[in-house]
Image (cartoon, rainbow, N blue to C red):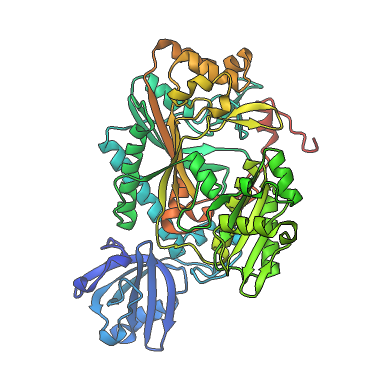
């Protein structure tokens, strides 16, 4: 066969026993080679898997000699006949383990130097080294599988949304800076010296304007940008599946469409048939039971409010908390009374990270009670506290006393830490639920003003409008978050669609008339010309891919991610630019400022 003109028959990982006897052409990277003297085995790899190639000296010494020069990561084109390996030589760990290719032609398309690390899922290489050579890191089968799944999620999204009448419409990357929350990435304008575009943190205003423009149903798989300090699983640029629909007047209208999309994605990627209607849980219940607005309900360790029980207990920490209008809540870690003091101290550090001053405990051991707070309680009060917590021999009870916000955050983190430490989570299941009825506002202690809990375009629950002026913290939002395995997979809301209520919302978060006009003038102007009721949501594509593929590292689901310092190690960015470029933009850089 003339390999110069021959094309690939099909990809390496797609061959099976049904192909035995066929003469084919394959291409790929060399994953491994084994020279046994007169027989040479090569594992040829592409994104679909590995096919074993067999070069036998008896089929041609010249061909065998050429194959003997091959090394790992060479790029090959090989012709030959697919044949069965034989029962004893079948490799059950490979999708192509029943067959091999008996090579009769070879073309080395590209040679390769020895890589800086082994291209294997078993290889141990530091993250920074792998990010520097990301194009090599991406050859690893595990990462290729993850990115293939990501592509399937996107494909399923386009297919489902198009069928449901949603239009794929692009929105601008160069827009107006409307600072509220995270910092914008700014882009200087050469044409307008001293002025800047901002990269979008989300297409929120644009997608609402599309509803005002009459497009009725919109979706987009879109890049978003936030210039904020990076933590684990946060990147400066991320992707979301963005959805908006007109004439959605209640959360259920949007949630129904979102559920259909998630069912389609899980069916396409995992073959799972999810329930037609996901569970609902109100925000207040999620916080009181799990201490989190993204509760993981795959395990117990639910919070218990014992504020009334500990009143008059004599324990000053609890007494002071109840007098200040704070709460005392606890967690019963059933059967874990045997944990060591070192482990308890580690959990103390967990709650302190979330603002709690300390962690009280009662260990109900077989040989008696171990607790630094027992001496402050009368026997009657102590028994009442243990009973209220459902405490039994073998349990350990933990308590935090503070403002509700701190108590929820601390105990919410504690229950997760205990569950992970003692393997209480069933990782084989998907726990999916909606959290609804969020507060419309939250109070900023530092700035002494109200903030929108989601964003200032979220509509309040109609029945709560009566509280808007006198008790705004009591107003609930028509907002909803989809939570999967204790992670926020996406969220959205029904939007405000009347000019008066939208202006009222801006005023409640202390935006002046000047602020409103400067930041949102074009948006407010659009409200003068008729606005249909509308709502939407956005799913985080990166987070969704992490949940479906089971990885806990966001860098695994992004082809070319940044490191924790928001730097691209492969391309060495950000970097300085030529003085001429700065001059054109009328910019000066003061690196010492």
Q: Is residue 92 above or below residue 288?
A: below
* Residue 281 x %, y %: 43, 43
* Residue located farthest toward the right when viewing the structure as drawn: 592
Q: In this view, does 15 lie to the left or right of 491?
A: left
Query: Which residue is at 32% across, 66% downward?
Result: 12
Toward the viewer: 558 or 416?
416
| Number of numbered callouts drawn | 0
Q: In this view, does 207 lie above or below 158?
A: above
* Quarter-of-image position of residue 320: top right
Q: Is residue 579 left or right of residue 431?
A: right
Residue 553 visible in the snapshot: yes
Q: In this view, does 242 lie above or below 499?
A: below
Q: Is residue 70 left or right of residue 447?
A: left
Q: Is residue 411 left or right of residue 156?
A: right
The C terminus - image quarter? top right
Q: In this view, does 491 lie above or below 469?
A: below
* Residue 521 x %, y %: 54, 15
Toward the viewer: 266 or 370?
370
Query: Which residue is at 38% across, 46% downward?
Result: 279
């Amino acid at each position: 066969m003339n390999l110069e003109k021959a094309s690939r028959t099909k990809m390496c990982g797609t061959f099976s026993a049904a192909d035995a006897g066929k003469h084919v052409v394959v291409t790929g990277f060399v994953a491994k080679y084994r020279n046994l003297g007169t027989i040479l085995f090569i594992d040829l790899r592409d994104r679909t898997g590995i096919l074993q190639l067999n070069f036998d000296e008896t089929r041609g010494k010249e061909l065998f000699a050429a194959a003997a020069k091959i090394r790992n990561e060479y790029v090959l084109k090989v012709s030959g006949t697919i044949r069965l390996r034989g029962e004893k030589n079948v490799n059950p760990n490979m999708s192509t383990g029943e067959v091999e290719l008996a090579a009769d032609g070879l073309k080395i398309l590209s040679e390769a130097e020895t890589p800086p690390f082994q291209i294997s899922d078993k290889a141990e290489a530091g993250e920074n080294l792998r990010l520097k050579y990301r194009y090599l890191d991406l050859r690893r089968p595990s990462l290729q599988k993850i990115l293939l799944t990501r592509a399937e999620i996107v494909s399923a999204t386009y297919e489902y949304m198009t069928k449901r009448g949603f239009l794929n419409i692009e929105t601008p990357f160069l827009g107006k800076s409307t600072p509220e929350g995270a910092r914008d990435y700014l882009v200087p304008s050469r044409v307008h010296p001293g002025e800047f575009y901002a990269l979008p943190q989300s297409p929120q205003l644009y997608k609402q304007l599309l509803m005002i423009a009459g497009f009725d149903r919109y979706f987009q798989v879109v890049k978003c940008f936030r210039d904020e300090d990076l933590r684990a699983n946060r990147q400066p640029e991320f992707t979301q599946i963005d959805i908006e629909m007109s004439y959605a007047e209640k959360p259920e209208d949007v949630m129904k469409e979102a559920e259909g999309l998630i069912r389609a994605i899980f069916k396409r990627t995992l073959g799972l048939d999810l329930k037609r209607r996901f569970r609902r849980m109100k925000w207040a219940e999620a916080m009181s039971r799990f201490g989190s607005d993204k509760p993981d309900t795959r395990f117990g360790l639910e919070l218990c409010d014992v504020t009334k029980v500990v009143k008059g207990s004599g324990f000053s920490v609890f007494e002071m908390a109840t007098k200040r209008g704070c709460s005392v809540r606890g967690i019963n870690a059933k059967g874990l009374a045997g944990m060591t003091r070192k482990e308890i101290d580690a959990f103390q550090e967990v709650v302190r990270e979330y603002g709690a001053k300390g962690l009280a405990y009662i260990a109900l051991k077989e040989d008696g009670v171990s607790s630094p707070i027992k001496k402050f309680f009368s026997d009657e009060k102590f028994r009442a506290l243990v009973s209220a917590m459902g405490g039994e021999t073998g349990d350990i009870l933990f308590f935090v006393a503070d403002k509700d916000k701190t108590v929820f955050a601390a105990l919410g983190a504690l229950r997760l830490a205990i569950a992970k430490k003692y393997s209480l989570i069933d990782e084989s299941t998907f726990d999916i639920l909606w959290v609804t009825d969020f507060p419309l506002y939250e109070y900023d202690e530092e700035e002494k003003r109200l903030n929108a809990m989601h964003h200032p375009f979220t509509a309040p629950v109609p029945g709560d409008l009566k509280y808007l002026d006198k008790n705004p913290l009591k107003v609930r939002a028509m907002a909803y978050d989809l939570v999967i395995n204790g992670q926020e997979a996406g969220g959205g809301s029904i939007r405000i669609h009347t000019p008066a209520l939208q202006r009222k919302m801006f005023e409640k978060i202390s935006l002046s008339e000047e602020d409103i006009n400067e930041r949102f003038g074009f948006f407010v102007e659009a409200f003068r010309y008729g606005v249909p009721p509308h709502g939407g949501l956005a799913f985080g594509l990166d987070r969704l891919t992490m949940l479906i593929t089971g990885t806990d590292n966001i860098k695994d689901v992004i082809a070319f991610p940044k490191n924790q310092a928001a730097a691209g190690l492969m391309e060495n960015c950000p970097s300085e630019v030529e003085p001429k470029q700065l001059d054109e933009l009328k910019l000066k850089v003061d690196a010492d400022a």
